[in-house]
Amino acid sequence: MTCFLLSVTNSCNKACAYCVVKQWRNNPEYPDKIAAIDVIKFLGKEMKAGDTVELTGGEPTLFTGLLLLLEWLREHNARVIMRTNGCKLDSWRKEFPNMVIVLAKHDSSDEYIEQKRAFLLPHDIVQTELDIVPPDSTEPKFRTNDTSPLGKHGYTKAFFVTADGNLRFMPCVNVSMGNIINSDYSLEPWSCLAMNSCPYMLGAWNLAARMEKWSR
Ligand code: SF4
């Protein structure tokens, strides 16, 4: 199985101090270049039913064409993860039971989170401020309240696409494999010795496993 991590937009409505994409976020030097159709074209060639597609940003609900992409992913039996601050999260969410939402509170009010909870499904996760690690900590920025029952993942490949269409073998391998916008890429047979114990892939595997039902 393959895990695709798609950073679909550099836009965000927030400005968290601990943001890992601070350098690119809302920065006119790093405009978004991919459209939903570019992602669909790429996944249409590379994705198989049951693969995981994780959507992140920036704030992925600000991605133009998000619903078109989600509909395509549902139709092609992808397991979808979306990490969001809930910006445009609304009643449409319940049309996608093949997706698990990780709703991060950041500096939003309790009332805001309660409102957004109404749009969540039982397998979704809310990361509260209690999960946020202080900015000067060397620990991961968030502790998840997912209990991660599975200690092994089943991914054999993983790919990372940024909002300019650049393709890499995971965020930690900073080597471009081309760009998906004009299909100008090749999926080199990269391998990673740490893949079996990769915390990112283990987290994605556990999140994807939260979904019991798939819909077409
Ligand atoms: S909501 Fe997420 S992407 Fe936006 S500023 Fe905060 S950490 Fe960064």
Image (spheres, helix red, strand yellow):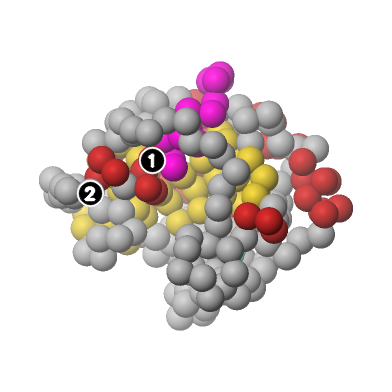
The foreground one among 198 and 55 is 198
Ligand 1 in which quarter: bottom right
* Residue 179 occupies quadrant: bottom left
Q: Residues within 10 Å of mark 2 (few under 14, many from 20)?
A: few
Q: Is residue 37 left or right of residue 212?
A: left
Three-letter code for the amino acid on which mark 1 is drawn: Leu
Q: Position of residue 172 (x, y in %)?
A: 30, 60
Q: Is residue 17 magenta?
A: no
How many numbered circles does the render carry? 2
Q: Is residue 101 visible?
A: yes
Task: Pick the quarter of the image with the N terminus.
Answer: top left
* Residue 15 occupies quadrant: bottom right
Q: Residues within 10 Å of mark 1 (few under 14, many from 20)?
A: many
Residue matched to label 2: 194
Residue matched to label 1: 202
Three-letter code for the amino acid on which mark 2 is drawn: Ala
